[in-house]
Amino acid sequence: MKTVLLLKEIYLEGFRNIGNYIVRNYFKVFTWFTIVLLGVVSYAFLYRLVTGFAFD
């Protein structure tokens, strides 16, 4: 019975760490993606301001 409980604990610990790793990397990728999109929007807005685009 101790062996089964030990294997269960190892199994749960392994998947707990995988979940944290996936979530942590997902948020890193999402953060960089958001920063890139904000950069593109800022560039487009400043380009329109500099070229004299009429914001009617």
Image: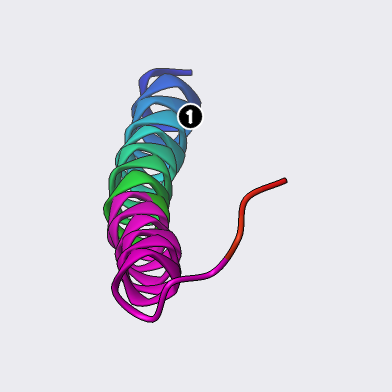
Name the residue carrying label 1.
Answer: 8
Q: Residue furthest right?
A: 56
Query: Horizontally, is 14 left or right of 28 in the view?
Result: right
Query: Horizontally, is 47 left or right of 44 in the view?
Result: left
The residue located at (31%, 49%) in the rendering is 31
Q: Which residues are magenta?
A: 31-53
Q: Nearer the viewer, residue 44 or 17?
A: 44
Percent across and percent down for residue 48 are 45, 71
Q: Is residue 52 magenta?
A: yes
The residue located at (33%, 60%) in the rendering is 42
Q: Quadrant of residue 33?
A: bottom left
Q: Nearer the viewer, residue 26 or 1?
A: 26
Name the residue type under label 1.
Lys
Q: Is residue 32 above or below residue 4?
A: below
Magenta span: predominant SS is: helix
The residue located at (54%, 69%) in the rendering is 53
Q: Nearer the viewer, residue 17 or 41?
A: 41
Percent across and percent down for residue 28 are 27, 53
Percent across and percent down for residue 45 are 42, 61
Quadrant where the C terminus sits is top right
Q: Quadrant of residue 47?
A: bottom left
